[in-house]
Amino acid sequence: RAALMLTELGGVVAGGVLVNKPGLAVIVANQIEEFGAFYAVTRLADKGRSVDPESVRAIGRSLVGAAVEMATIFIATLEWAMADPSRPIDAQLAGCNPPVSPPSERVPMQLAAYAAALEAGAAAGGLLDQAGDMFGF
């Protein structure tokens, strides 16, 4: 089942070995990052969390590395389970523990757009305040 899951993710398994691990890691990390960015924007809005544009960008910079870490753990766990089909698919037993990624310079598009929207909203609010002051509101 681990080989099937790797294959379904885009992996190429030959002779019980994942032969395109670096490429698959990029695919899976991108999928995790995309989902994570969408989820973060949705949850921040749903929970009414007060965030500023820089906080949103900081979340994005952290998400980039976290997605790579998660992809690394997921793929390594599946490889470990594939090596012995009697093993459970268990990340702790697989023993994969990648180093913590530093924040990235890149912010996922969804979070960059959210930060820009927050900035635009703040700028619009400032213009409305100025207009109100001009007209005595």
Image (cartoon, rainbow, N blue to C red):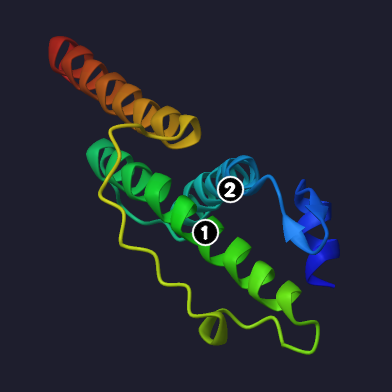
> What residue did someone put label 2 on?
25
How crowded pointer 2 is (Cα within 10 Å; few <14, some 14-19, many 20+) is rated as many
Q: Residue at x 80, y 54 (%)?
A: 13
Q: How far separated are the C-alphas under marks 1 and 2?
A: 6 Å
Give the answer, above or below, for where 50 lies relative to 87: above
**Identity of the residue drawn at 64% across and 74% down:** 80
CB under 8 Å between discs 1 and 2: yes
Q: Give the SS element for disc 1.
A: helix
Q: Position of residue 5 (x, y in %)?
A: 80, 62
Q: Where is residue 46 in the image (x, y as percent from the top left)?
A: 51, 56
Element type at marker 2? helix
Comparing 30 with 52, the one in front is 30
> Which residue does the numbered mark 1 point to in the structure image?
72
Q: Which residue is outermost to the front?
A: 15
Name the image quarter holding the N terminus: bottom right
**Residue positioned 43% across, 37% down in the render:** 111
Label whose residue precedes the other's in the sequence (1 or 2): 2
In this rendering, is residue 130 above or below 79? above
**Residue 23 located left or right of residue 86:** left
- At 55% from the left edge and 52% from the top edge, which residue is drawn? 39
User: Is residue 49 or residue 60 the one in the foreground?
Assistant: 60
